[in-house]
Image (cartoon, grey):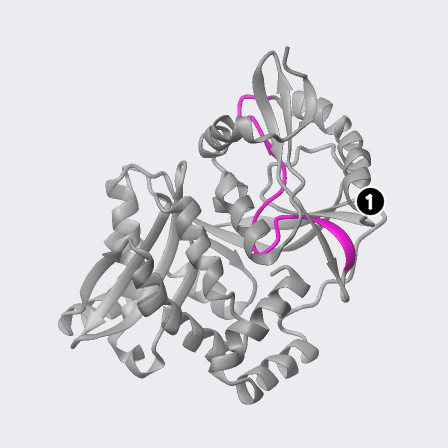
Amino acid sequence: MEKEGWVQYEDDVEIVWDHFVEAHPHGRLSHLIGFKKTVASVYGLKPNYWLYRKTGRILAVFPSFFHRGLIYGRRLVSQPFSEYGGLLFSPELKTSEKLLILNEFPKVIESSQKRGCFDYLELRCFSDIPVGSERILRKKCLYAYGILDLGEELNLWRAVDSSVRKNLRRARSYELALEEAKDRLALEGIFYPLYLQTLKRLGSPPHPLLYFLSLHENLKEKMKLFLARWDGAYVSALLGWAVGKSVHITDIASNEKFFHLRANDFLHFELIQWARAHGFQYFDFGPIRYRGQRQYKKKWGVKQFEYAYYYYPPEKIPRLLSDRSLAARVASACWKILIPTCLASRIGKYLRKELSL
């Protein structure tokens, strides 16, 4: 007989876990078991996955990893290397039913302490935490995230800002070619060089190539890699994930020499059109942290929603490093100037692991 209540994840529930995630409006790449396999194998973090089961049905899932770093100390993170994570409750549950499940959640934390030492829990999540959870989890509002509803009423050409239409006309005038890549050779030979170049320009440490290759191996059918080619050269790449009801973009990579082609807008438009044609309900542009992101995503007609982190115990809220702070800007400038591209991937892996970003 299956145990009920909060139980630890075992491999024999992988299929039903992923089905639960894909049926949830907030289910994303970071909730799938393929992501768990990648983070564990590439970064060596220990997973800590739980599910809540009643009468044979999964009513909630909680993915997380043990993480230890010099800056944030010992913590349980849901999810590292992702903008999203956290608890997912069955959409059919009422608020009162979610709270009953959440009231048992401290037992999960206690059991997790026996598996790995940590001082606090950090949930990076959507607004799936029910109202009334303040006694258990402390909320820290951070920014917003942008969602484009792909309903039948959407006329994408009219929904976008006039500047987007102008950029799309320019891209078409240059006769940009669209390609969808599905093999690891394209990831390694086309996407990753553009990705390294982009992260270097932004002054941000990259993931190692193995991270993307592992995601491809574990979640190949969910990966959407759109490429823009012009005059024989690949000038831009957009990496997204088709999970459940949404397509969520995670990486944009481009060659700055070809910015005048407006290939990034071209690829966004094409991937949104693909998502609509294949019956997806939402296009997730991800979190909006600063003015430039807000302006870019707003012109696509997105709706903005509150985005927050949650902490347990409630009194444990670390001071988060802002990517707009002076220290972050100095670190970014040093990365641009001092770190050669040939070493960026190797060093970037350790910095990514330290910050779990």
Q: Residue at x 36, y 49 (%)?
A: 223
The reply, left or right, for residue 252 in relation to residue 267 is: right
Which amino acid type is shown beneath numbered disc 1?
Answer: Pro
The residue carrying mark 1 is 314
Does residue 155 appear in this view?
no
Q: Residue at x 76, y 66 (%)?
A: 71
Q: Residue at x 58, y 82 (%)?
A: 335
Q: Is residue 268 above or below residue 306?
A: below
Stretch of the chain drawn in magenta: 73-93
Residue 332 drawn at (x, y percent): 59, 80
Q: Is residue 57 above or below residue 124?
A: above
Locate the N terminus and report the quarter of the image it occupies. Answer: top right
The reply, left or right, for residue 110 in relation to residue 330 is: right
Q: Tag 1, which secondary structure?
A: loop
Locate the C terminus and report the quarter of the image it occupies. Answer: bottom right
Image quadrant where residue 50 sits? top right
Q: Is residue 81 magenta?
A: yes
Residue 93 drawn at (x, y percent): 59, 22
Image quadrant where residue 181 sits? bottom left
State the predominant SS element of the stretch in magenta.
Answer: loop
Label 1 crowd (10 A; few <14 / some 14-19 / many >=20): some
Residue furthest to the right: 315
Residue furthest to the bottom: 337
